[in-house]
Amino acid sequence: MSWRELQSAFAAAVRDPAQAVPDAVGPRETQPPIARFNVYRNNSAVSLTEAMADSFPVVAELVGEEFFTAMARAYVAGNLPASPVLLHYGGLFPEFIEAFEPAAALPFLADVARVEWAWTQAYHAEDRDSIGAGALQSIDQERLDSARLELHPSVQLPQSDWPAASIWSAHQISGADARQAALQQITNAGECALIVRPEFEVNVQLIEASIFRLLKSLGGGATLGQAAGDLDEDDMQQFGGMLGFIFSTGAVVAVTPGQ
């Protein structure tokens, strides 16, 4: 058996307790291979489940520790880490929750998980210095339409048919009474959010759908003229103010003048 084959067999056996212990795990006088290997299986599952709880604390609070542990264990069983750095583990958890039948009674849960994962991505994103809207003043007027904005590496734009970002934000409030009061004020409506970490703190804020579409266009490489052209007539009247708001959040790190 090659080293790669041995690794694959070992990983498969760790994930599936029904599989036999790999032949390379030899016997010892004190314990049989299955006893020692089951310790490894358990430790592996526990460490990954704990990593999931660290990345998705609001999801865990919403469903309770027992339910979350069972759901995370089911995820772990079918999703090995792609990196030895566990803070990168869990990116597919929102999609898993959507298909996890026992969680069907909480249709907003997967989108809350998406907000949590977006927060984690923003927190660990590359550091860059943000710039203000004054950067646009240095560009010749005739070249402004063809200018492009570079968004901060931390920018995340979760969107949901549910108030997922508001649910997440309410769970950041200290004190059970204050948190419950915030949750009761949430309206059952879809939301768009901007998550960005311009300095040391990750900021999560709700944004209008028009600003969301504008950020998506600019983040996708559209010029200012192209992004403006994608807006409807009413939003076009607010284009300058929308750009000013985007700069004020620290979401822009560079402006590239058009040719």
Image (spheres, rainbow, N blue to C red):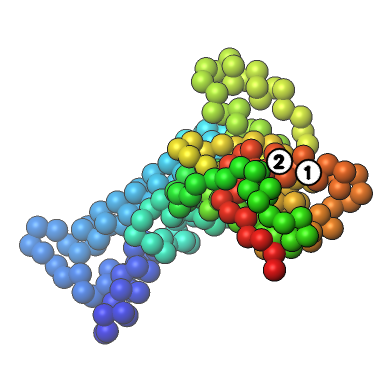
Q: Residues within 10 Å of mark 2 (few under 14, many from 20)?
A: some
Is 254 rendered above or below residue 179?
A: below
Q: Amino acid at mark 1?
A: Gly
Q: Quadrant of the N terminus?
A: bottom left
Nearer to the camera, 109 or 37: 109
> What kind of element bears circle 1?
helix
Q: Residue 244: which numbered mark, if any?
A: 2
Q: Which residue is mark 1?
A: 240
For residue 185, side relative to residue 56 (left or right): right
What residue is at 77 percent from the left and 39 percent from the top? 241
For residue 233, side relative to residue 213 (left or right): right
Tag 1 near tag 2, CB within 8 Å? yes
What residue is at 30 percent from the left and 73 percent from the top? 7
Q: Residues within 10 Å of mark 1 (few under 14, many from 20)?
A: few
Nearer to the camera, 185 or 157: 157
Q: Amino acid at mark 2?
A: Gly
Q: Residue furthest left?
A: 29
Please provide percent x and percent y for residue 193.
Answer: 67, 42
Nearer to the camera, 51 or 245: 245
Please provide percent x and percent y for residue 259.
Answer: 70, 68
Q: Which of the 4 image quarters holds residue 140? A: bottom right
Please provide percent x and percent y for residue 16.
Answer: 39, 63
Instruction: Tell me if I can see residue 234 in this picture.
Output: yes
Q: Residue furthest bottom?
A: 1
Q: Which of the 4 image quarters holds residue 216? A: bottom right
What residue is at 48 percent from the left and 61 percent from the top? 78
Nearer to the camera, 207 or 61: 207
Is 141 rendered above or below residue 13?
A: above
Please provide percent x and percent y for residue 105.
Answer: 68, 41
